[in-house]
Image: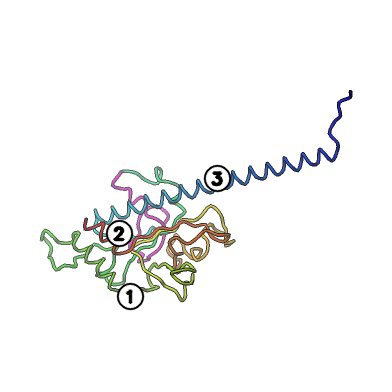
Amino acid sequence: MKNRGFTLIEMAIVSVVIGLISASAMALFKSSQQLQKKMTTDAVLIRLSNELVNFAINNHRLPCPDTSSDGYENCATGVTTGGVPFNTLLFELGTSIANSDSEELNMIYGVYKHTTSSADLTVLAERTGDTLGMEDYQNQNDFVQALRNAVAYTTSAAYPYLTGNDAQSGAEDCTSNVVVNPAFVIASAGGEDRSGNGNNFDGVNENLSQDGTGGNCFAAIGRREDANYDDGMIAVDFNSLLSHVIN
């Protein structure tokens, strides 16, 4: 009996099946890559948040943003948003950009730098009445007072703030919905330019800038990923930072 080869119809069907399998495999691979990217980003955000808290505990202030892309804080500029000052954070450990995670290079850091020194979290200042030479002059108590002063101020768009999430915190609107000023906040660009704005920061985060010339409006923490947004976010409020400092 002769062996019968595949007919054109059978080969077409096989080709379609192989194509479907390949497409599914590619989709799963892409999904796996995106999940791995998100897990890496989340881990870096948590680590940076911990480093900022430790910096505040050790230095009785928070660092200023980096506006020169060298990894070091730039306090002279007076800006409240910019790059993450990772070299400033890691200086005490003897590390630098060469050992820094590349994820940190695509993040925006915002800090509550109030116009009055009584609530400027980036300034080491005497706020409790001690004088130079006294044991408690410019120490932890003064940073604690700065945090308490910051809590008392009205939420303002003049400092880094989170807007709503189109759910329980109201509309995602930088103009009309200033939800809260955190002590500090970090936004991390996702792996894709989902909003089509020319960079990987999406949604309201597209108005942020690492050189300090961007806005103060950050996407809400927990803002859901969708077809137009895949950024990572983390923030610490005044009271949470206060609890870390005094414990």
User: Which residue type does callout 1 highlight?
Assistant: Thr
Residue 69 position, x and y percent, is 42, 55
Residue 62's label in the rendered image is 2
**How many residues crowd around disc 2 within 10 Å: few (fewer than 14), some, or many (20 or more)?**
many
Residue 219 position, x and y percent, is 46, 64
SS assignment at label 3: helix
Residue marked by disc 1: 154
- The stretch drawn in magenta includes residue 232: no
Q: CA distance from mark 1 to mark 2?
A: 20 Å
Image vertical order of residue 142 relative to residue 11, above or below:
below
Magenta residues? Answer: 68-93
Residue marked by disc 3: 32
Q: CA distance from mark 2 to mark 3?
A: 36 Å
Residue 159 occupies quadrant: bottom left
**How many residues crowd around disc 1 within 10 Å: few (fewer than 14), some, or many (20 or more)?**
few
Residue depicted at x 38% and y 69% = 180
Residue depicted at x 15% and y 61% = 137
Q: Give the residue furthest to the right.
A: 1
